[in-house]
Image (tube, rainbow, N blue to C red):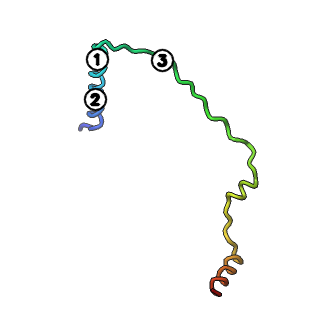
Amino acid sequence: MTNNYILVGTERQAQLEAAKAAFFTSGGQVTELGSYRFSPAPPRADKIDPETVLVRKRRKPSAADRAALRRMAESL
């Protein structure tokens, strides 16, 4: 049983090797560059403003509020 992914991967590897050989035979040279320096994002603030949390959180209407809305809707 053959796996198509393995066959495709082998073909792709052969293509890359041929391209690499063509690059070097045409006079191409490899230059080694400096490494990438990873700098993580600064940590978020530890303090959470309670007013902001209250503004973002939407409260569900209570049973009394729903009843009052229902009465207003019926009166229209």
SS under mark 3 = loop
Q: CA distance from mark 3 to mark 2?
A: 29 Å
Mark sitting earlier along the chain (2/1): 2
Q: Position of residue 33 (x, y in %)?
A: 48, 17
Which numbered mark, 3 or 2, is in the foreground of this view? Answer: 3
> Contact (CB < 8 A) between labels 3 and 1?
no
Residue 57 placement, left or right of 4: right
- The residue pinned by badge 2 equals 10
Q: Is residue 50 left or right of residue 43?
A: right
Find residue 49 and name its label: none
Query: Contact (CB < 8 A) between labels 3 and 2?
Result: no
**Residue lying farthest to the bottom in this orientation:** 75
Q: The residue tagged with tag 2: helix, strand or loop?
A: helix
Q: Which amino acid type corresponds to the residue marked 2 in the rendered image?
A: Thr
Q: Is residue 14 above or below residue 31?
A: below
x and y percent of residue 50 in the render?
A: 76, 53
Q: CA distance from mark 2 to mark 1?
A: 16 Å
Q: Which residue is mark 1?
A: 21
Q: Is residue 14 above or below residue 68?
A: above
- First along the sequence among labels 3 and 2: 2
* Residue sitting at x 39%, y 15%: 30
Please state which of the two labelled residues, at mark 2 or mark 1, is closer to the viewer.
1
Between 12 and 68, the one nearer to me in the picture: 68
Q: Estimate how packed mark 1 is, as few (under 14), some (14 to 19) or many (20 or more) residues with alpha carbons within 10 Å.
A: few
Q: Amino acid at mark 1?
A: Ala
Q: Image quarter for residue 41?
A: top right
